[in-house]
Image (tube, rainbow, N blue to C red):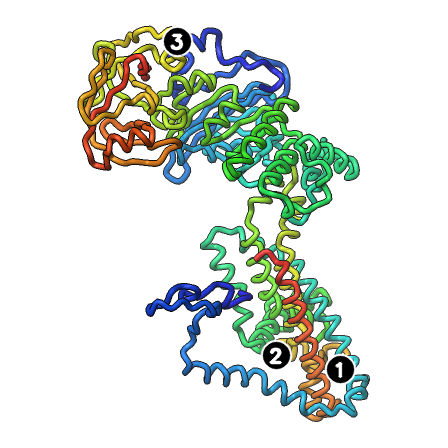
Amino acid sequence: MGNEPVAGGRAGDRGEPAMGNEPVAGGEPVTGREPVTGRGRLEARVGGRRGGLDFDVALELAPGEVLGVLGPNGAGKSTLLECLAGLLTPAHGHIVLDGRELLSATASGRRTVPPARRGIGLLGQEPRLFPHLTVRDNVAFGPSFGHRAARMPRSRARAQADAWLDRVGLGGLGAGRPRQLSGGQQQRVAIARALAADPAVLLLDEPLASLDAEVAPEIRRVLRDQLAATGTSALLVSHDVLDAVALADRVAVLDRGRVVESGTTAAVLQAPRTPFLAALAGVNLVAGVAVGNRVVAGACAFAGVSSQGSMRGADASPATLPDGARAAAVFRPSSVIVATSRPEGTSLRNIWRDRVAAIEPAPGGALLRFAAPALAAEVTAAALAELGVHEGDEVWLAVKASEVGVHALA
Amino acid sequence: MSTPTSARPGPAAGAAGPTGRTTRAATRPAATIPVLLWLPATIGLALLVLPLIGLVARVDWATLPADLASPEALSALRLSLITAAAAAAVCVLLGVPLALLLARAPARLAAVLRAIVTVPLVLPPLVGGIALLSLFGRTGLFGGALEAWGVRLPFTTAAVVVAQCFVALPFLVLAVEGALRASGTAEERVAATLGARPLTVFFRITVPLAAPGLIAGTVLCFARAMGEFGATALFAGNAAGTTRTMPLAIYTAFNGAGVSQGEAVALSLMLLAAALAILVLVRGWRPGASR
């Protein structure tokens, strides 16, 4: 995305996920692409304490690149964005945008550039349009009252705002008030307003989370198109894997204030290393220890194939894992076979018994949740009726080795 | 604040009663006020309204135009309008920043500040007048220093404005603080990330978003300044033309000096009408408010 072709990390990343996806320790920055000329090169490392969270995050953004930041609630995603925007000053850290130092915080002192002079925009979950201004004046706010260097006469700012409204599909609505617009339209205006201020980097804090499911795809497309058209670098915090896939070139996964995983979006989602990311990618992840090329977790032992092969359904080669290493088995909920009697089948190597912990509705059927190991099995409504199982019932579970991806964990 | 009850159907509305009957007509909420309380409530209301009716009844409509047009009355009215407008302006200039401080300060500091701001609200104005004299009087804390500079504040028109500010400022601060709290800081943060400097954010975002509270606060503040008597009487005195505002003119008239009692009633009627007009004005702003 952006003006640059999508390319992730170093050459060979895609083929060797074990290398490209290595979790990054707090100190090492998430590596970006090869140096490219252009605006929006961000290097940041921020750390400190906030409400019980001890965070230390380092990342880099190449010009025009979109980095997705995924992570469970409380992982420190919002804190990271606030530090970058200048709304929060971390205890220690260093932020450099296009060679300009925005923050230098050490034990001996803190120097920080205020939010208004950072050239970093912020688009949140809520559009937060200014209710007392027309839609046009909302979009014209940045060019009218923003950076002195980029400031322009009001009439020109308004003309430019109208052009922006056209670009986000709201041409002709400039004279109205924000409250006359729908939620989706308001978020379009917010996108236009953020980009009209011409930020070098745009921070996106779950920009589609508060929208209806029918509206979100359109807004996602608008956002993607406009980020690409302007070549704006962006940091996207999201809970939605679709956002990451559609918008981000790379993703970094945050957990308890640390980057625990990073790489190209495709590579990270194909071989998730944390239960959070697995849930995000809609797959089961059972972590355990490698014994004889199997992943042993409690009473279960999973045989499988090289992780990426299993997800692609091609060139599935038997996995090789160093004995005693931490490893994970990854498979889809729909790959899990549920039966009331021991299933027979030559290709079935992974078989175990567990009690149904919960039954949840799912599109076209139900998700059966199990506790040991924690995973979900997807069954059709008809299959559920035929099984006649209820919460608390014990069932047989099986999954074909060819549908299990196994990989080492750091 | 504005609509105490109604709007929501009572628990029994539309639902089948215990006897199985559906009460379709009962779209009003069930009465929740014990019957016995109607009596004190009515007496309370009468206590507030009847004196005003009594006042209106005492008005001598024949002499009213002449009473209102007397030089003394016009002078007092003019002084009241000027001083109250000046006081309201000063309160806006000082009170809005103070309200912002209250609204954005950490909870503890805000509580302390709010208590301080509220003191003049509960303090008898006479005490306020003595306090102001103790500060600016000839032997007061600042009075001596001011005297040395050739400035004498007590018993001047400026003293009237200071006394009015003292009693009216809390009204403005508390109203604006409420509005600032209600509007929050999210829009301000957005404006900052769009490149707007703090002062630009304040004038372009913070103040417009708090406008309903600011207008209501200013109007209340003006009304309180118009009615100020106690602090003014002690701190500014009662000199016709320079410090005799409407309330002081009414007091003086009632004591039989300067103006007649009929005039006092006429002036009171005018203040009452002004108060009612202000109330209507404030209520008129409310629906547009964001709270």
Query: Mark 3: which secondary structure?
Result: loop
Q: Amino acid at mark 2?
A: Gly
Q: Are marks 1 and 3 in contact (CB under 8 Å)?
A: no
Dot 3 amino acid type: Ala
Tell me the residue at 51%/26% (across/down): A94
User: Image quadrant of residue B159?
Assistant: bottom right
Q: Secondary structure at mark 2?
A: helix
- Image height check: is B11 above or below A342? below
Label 2 with label 1: CB-CB less than 8 Å: no
User: Which of these two is toward me, A230 or B166?
Assistant: A230
Q: Residues within 10 Å of mark 2 (few under 14, many from 20)?
A: many
A326 displayed left or right of A138: left
The chain holding disc 2 is B
Residue assigned mark 1 = B240
Local packing at callout 1 (Cα closer than 10 Å; few below 14, some 14-19, many 20+) is: some
Real-space Cα separation, disc 1 to disc 3, in angstroms: 101 Å
Which residue carries the number 3 mark?
A314
- Helix, strand or loop at disc 1? loop
Residue A61 % position (x, y):
54, 21
Q: Quadrant of residue B234?
A: bottom right
Choose the circle earlier in sequence order: 2 or 1: 2
Residue for badge 2:
B230
Q: Chain of mark 1?
A: B
